[in-house]
Each structure stands twice: as structure tokens, then as C-alpha cells.
């Protein structure tokens, strides 16, 4: 991954997780902007409002719209279906469901910096 200008949409209902992710991503040297969303519905709003998002990091358990429902919406949308999505969760039992509904990668929380960057390298050209 040679990109240094990635725009990442981070979706998590836990504000501490969002801040940690943002800090990791910006320190990696590959990311220029992190957009935060606190549930799937907010995230869909960001996706409709902007066309420069390169990657989504997605929590599963969230109020209003959880990660699995968001995956379904994104993968059913002609304009969004190609977007890479990495699921980040504490619940390993959600892995097969997340992959079935179109996640490109899966990481268990707590997220380690190196694991996150390595997983990003597998989904970003
Ligand atoms: Mg959550």
C-alpha cells in the first residue's frame, strides 16, 4: 500500500474506540482524513454526502443500525457496493455472518495498530 491520502469512514458507537482508531490511522502515514459515524445510519448519511471515501471500518453492535444491517445496505447499492469494509468487533461469532454479507476483512477488538494496517493492506491496492 503506497497510498498516503486515504479517507477512512470509522463507524462505532463507542467514542473511545473512534478516537483510538482515528489516532492509529492518522499516525500510520497512509490516511489523510478519518470521518466518524456513531451508527450505521449516520455512516450511510456520510456515504451519500461524499464520494471520496476509500475504506470503511465497521463495528457490529450499535444502536439504530448495526454493522450487519449496514453491510446489507452498502452491498445492495450500485454506487457503494465496491467499497472495502473491514469489520472490527469483540464478538468472534459474528465473523462468518460479516463475511457472508460482504465484509472484506475481520479483526477482533481490541485492535492492534500493526494488525489494522496489515489488514488494510490486504483490501487497499
Ligand atoms: Mg459497538
Image: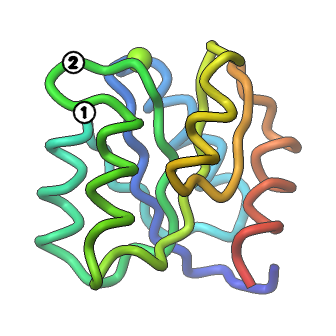
Question: Can you tell which quarter of the image residue 85 is in?
Answer: bottom right
Quick one: SS at disc 1?
A: loop
Q: Nearer the viewer, residue 78 or 30?
A: 78
Residue 48 figure quarter: bottom left
User: Position of 60 compared to 100: left or right?
Assistant: left
For label 2, the crowd category at 10 Å Cα-Cα, with few meaning under 14, some 14 to 19 and many 20 or more, is few
Question: Mark 2 near mark 1, Cβ–Cβ under 8 Å?
Answer: yes
Across and down, in percent, residue 118 comes to: 86, 55
Q: Which residue is mark 1?
A: 39
The circle drawn on residue 63 is: 2
Give me the residue at 39% from left, 50% from top. 71
How many numbered discs, if any?
2
Q: Considering depth in this image, is 96 or 124 the residue closer to the camera?
A: 96
x and y, in percent, of residue 56 in the image? 47, 57
Q: Which one is nearer the viewer's eye here, 97 or 13?
A: 97
Q: Residue at x 67, y 16 (%)?
A: 93
Query: Label 1: how many residues lie within 10 Å, few (<14), some (14-19) or many (20+)?
Result: many
Name the side, left or right, on which 36 lies relative to 102: left
Residue 64 in the image: above or below residue 4: above
Circle 2 sits in a helix, a strand or a loop, which is it? Answer: loop
Ligand 1 image position (quadrant)? top left
Amino acid at each position: 500500500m503506497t497510498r498516503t491520502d486515504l479517507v477512512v469512514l470509522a463507524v462505532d458507537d463507542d467514542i473511545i474506540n473512534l478516537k483510538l482508531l482515528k489516532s492509529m490511522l492518522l499516525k500510520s502515514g497512509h490516511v489523510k482524513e478519518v470521518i466518524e459515524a456513531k451508527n450505521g445510519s449516520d455512516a450511510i448519511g456520510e456515504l451519500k454526502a461524499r464520494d471520496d471515501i476509500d475504506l470503511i471500518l465497521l463495528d457490529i453492535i450499535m444502536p439504530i443500525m448495526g454493522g450487519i444491517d449496514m453491510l446489507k445496505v452498502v452491498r445492495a447499492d450500485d454506487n457503494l457496493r465496491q467499497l472495502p469494509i473491514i469489520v472490527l468487533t469483540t464478538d468472534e461469532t459474528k465473523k462468518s455472518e460479516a463475511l457472508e454479507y460482504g465484509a472484506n476483512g475481520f479483526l477482533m477488538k481490541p485492535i492492534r495498530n500493526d494488525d489494522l494496517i496489515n489488514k488494510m493492506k490486504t483490501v487497499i491496492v
